[in-house]
Image (spheres, rainbow, N blue to C red):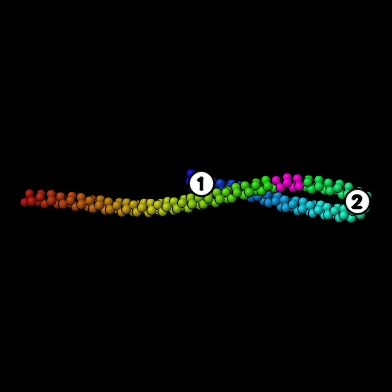
Amino acid sequence: RGPPAAAMEDADLIRLSVERLKRQKEQVEGLKDTLLERDATLLELQQQFDALSEELEDLQEAHEALRSDKATQDEALRRANEELLANSYRMRQSDENFAAQEKKWQEMEDLMRVTVQRFKAQAVQATQDLRKKDAALHESTAEARELRAQQKENIEAKMRLEAAGDQQKKRIMELEAAAAAAEEAKAEAERREKELRIRLEVR
């Protein structure tokens, strides 16, 4: 697998990791919105509790005011007891609802904590992967530079060899020309020697 194919595959892996981290971030944002809703619900429950407390105080004041009239007091006490029972029931229901909501919030907080930890772990892993890919890319770039330098040296060596070959061919041609000239000179010398020998024999 060549460097371009590996780079494309690494880019795809990095893109998938970034998309997965974006989805995790969206989940965290959703949990944050849920926590904001929790705060709003807590405020509403606190307001209900304050209102019930004020009603209870009003009923207690009415109870103290009705002590002077026994008959009215008994009736008022009965109504007050009914109100107190109703308020007690509403407060108990509110406490149960609050406990159930608190349990739900705790579960959401646990889920958010786990999600954030997973998000952090994935971010660390993605950072490590990016560093590894970056190191591999630098190493691949260095190898490519070495290959280009080697190719350049090979080309220069080839050119030197070709120049030396041309020089050698030129030298061979010169030697061949010199050999041909020597052959001609030898033939001319033999011819003159033969003529000289004939002249000597004639004399």
Q: Is residue 166 visible?
A: no
Q: Is residue 99 left or right of residue 113?
A: right
Q: Amino acid at mark 1?
A: Ala
Q: Is residue 133 left or right of residue 146?
A: right
10 Å neighbourhood of mark 2: few (<14), some, or many (≥20)? some
Residue range corresponding to the magenta coloring? 95-104
Question: Separation of disc 1 and disc 2 at Cα?
Answer: 91 Å
Q: Is residue 192 left or right of residue 155?
A: left
Task: Say which residue label 1 marks.
Answer: 6
Q: Position of residue 70 (x, y in %)?
A: 92, 51
Q: Which mark is residue 61?
A: none
Q: Nearer the viewer, mark 1 or mark 2?
A: 2
Residue drawn where x is 86% and y is 53% of the image: 59
10 Å neighbourhood of mark 1: few (<14), some, or many (≥20)? few
Report the front residue among 190 and 125: 125
Q: Amino acid at mark 2?
A: Gln
Task: Say which residue label 2 marks.
Answer: 73
| Mark nearer the N terminus (1 vs 2) | 1
Residue drawn where x is 57% and y is 49% of the image: 121
Q: Residue furthest top?
A: 1
